[in-house]
Amino acid sequence: MEKRLFLIDGNSLINRAFYALPPLTNASGDPTNAVYGFTMMLFRLKDDYNPDQILVTFDMSGPTFRHTQYEEYKATRKGMPDDLRSQIPVMKELLDKLGISRLELQGWEADDLLGTVARQGEGEGYEVFIVTGDRDAFQLISPQTKVLFTKRGITDTELVNEETLLKNYGVTPQQVIDLKGLMGDSSDNIPGVPGVGEKTALKLLTSYNSIEGVYAHLSELKGKLKENLTTYERQAFLSKELATIRVNAPVEVNLSETGEMDTSAVRELFGHLGFKTLVERLPHEVGKDSARGADEWNSSFEKVNHKNSGTFLEQLNEFQRVYFAYDPGQKTLFSLVEDDVWALSDTWINEHQDELCDALKGKDLYATGGKEVLHVLGAQGRDAIAFDLELALYCLDPERR
């Protein structure tokens, strides 16, 4: 099984978190919503995908080499709100305490660092996931690299690979920069060719594959489109170059080296920020206050992921009696098989429906909170619970809360 490398566009995610969540402050009145949203997504990624390595890239203030190429690059962007700017150092401090690597380099954009490390990761045998809300990263997609695209807010994501990119967006990874070269990009103030929008650019690329192909067949075009392409040829190629993510930034990361979380320091920082729910997600705290009592079975559990799925399913097949408890706060189904406790995320369950269905056929299922367990397992074809502890307790004492 391939190792998984997650590369996170720090500026993109913290920006999305800031605008997706309502204003939040700690007891001192400091804004915290962007840090909270970013951290929630980070924890969710770890739960759902169990990456072997995570790295977060950030932009630095000041011009980059693209400003040398085109002075007006990103000139129309509004300044960052103070309430967001003040949270970036806090987010970096938290990443350090979590043991998660971060990378930034003067004169280079976070995208270029993502591209460079993505190609390094491919060379070292990783399956690479780039997490961002910026479509520019689609050009980095390859057989080994996918983009986890944040479409809206911090929870609505789309996993984009070569196939879905072509199906949903109409281009190949190589054509992403040609598309930007022709239509431009208002968010980065990349000019493109006047009069050429997305629809026209996609038609041109469908017919001629690239900007170079368009200009090789310019004689086949007519009217205002041909006139604009002729007049703004230099601008089209400049726009393509500005949109191209570099994969040769002067950085080298030791991907085999993983940091250790300073749990006490993270807990202290969460306390300062007022993140009570996140404190509960730290090691040995997950599910502690769950209404379903999943953590009471065993304080030590193993998350089911792409590495150990086979082991879990084999054990499930081996024993007749299986216990379940669902923690809605963590969106996690805990399964007790013999003496082992496993934690199954909603994402893992959805991705392994057929195998889970086969493994549960004919089993005796015992549950705490059977209704919720059935709701989660319903897609797997289960329609009965042999014994529901919560229901039994209610029958014995209806006044019990």
Image: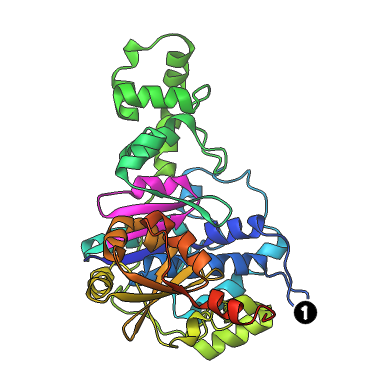
132 within the magenta span = yes
Q: Residue furthest top?
A: 223
Q: Is residue 199 above or below residue 258?
A: above
**Which quadrant holds the N terminus?**
bottom left
Quarter containing the C terminus: bottom right
User: Is any part of residue 107 visible from this angle?
Assistant: no
Residue 19: quadrant of the picture:
bottom right
Residue 33 rendering spot, x and y as whole percentages? 67, 66
* Vertical arrangement, residue 288 with respect to residue 127, above or below: below
Q: Is residue 3 left or right of residue 75?
A: left
Picture residue at 33% right of the left edge, 66% below the top: 5
Q: Farthest residue in the bottom direction?
A: 264
Look at the picture and state if 281 lies above or below 105: below
Residue 243 position, x and y percent, is: 43, 43
Pick the residue in front: 330 or 23: 330
Foreground of the two, 303 or 212 = 303
Task: Please report the residue visible at 55 percent of the width from the left and 74 percent of the height from the top.
Answer: 391
| Residue designated by label 1 | 28
Which scheme is used to colour this image of the protein?
Answer: rainbow
Q: Looking at the image, which is closer to me, 132 or 327? A: 327
Between 31 and 367, the one nearer to me in the picture: 367
The stretch drawn in magenta includes residue 335: no
- Residue 118: name its quadrant: bottom left
- Secondary element type, mark 1: loop
In percent of width and height, residue 352 lies at 32, 59
What residue sits 64% from the left and 60% below the top?
Answer: 18
How many numbered marks, from 0 up? Answer: 1
Under mark 1, the amino acid is Ser
**Mark 1 surroundings within 10 Å by alpha-carbon count, few (fewer than 14), some (14 through 19), many (20 or more):** few
Point out the stretch of residues depicted in magenta: 127-149
Residue 291 at least partly seen? yes
- Where is residue 106? Give x, y as percent: 48, 64
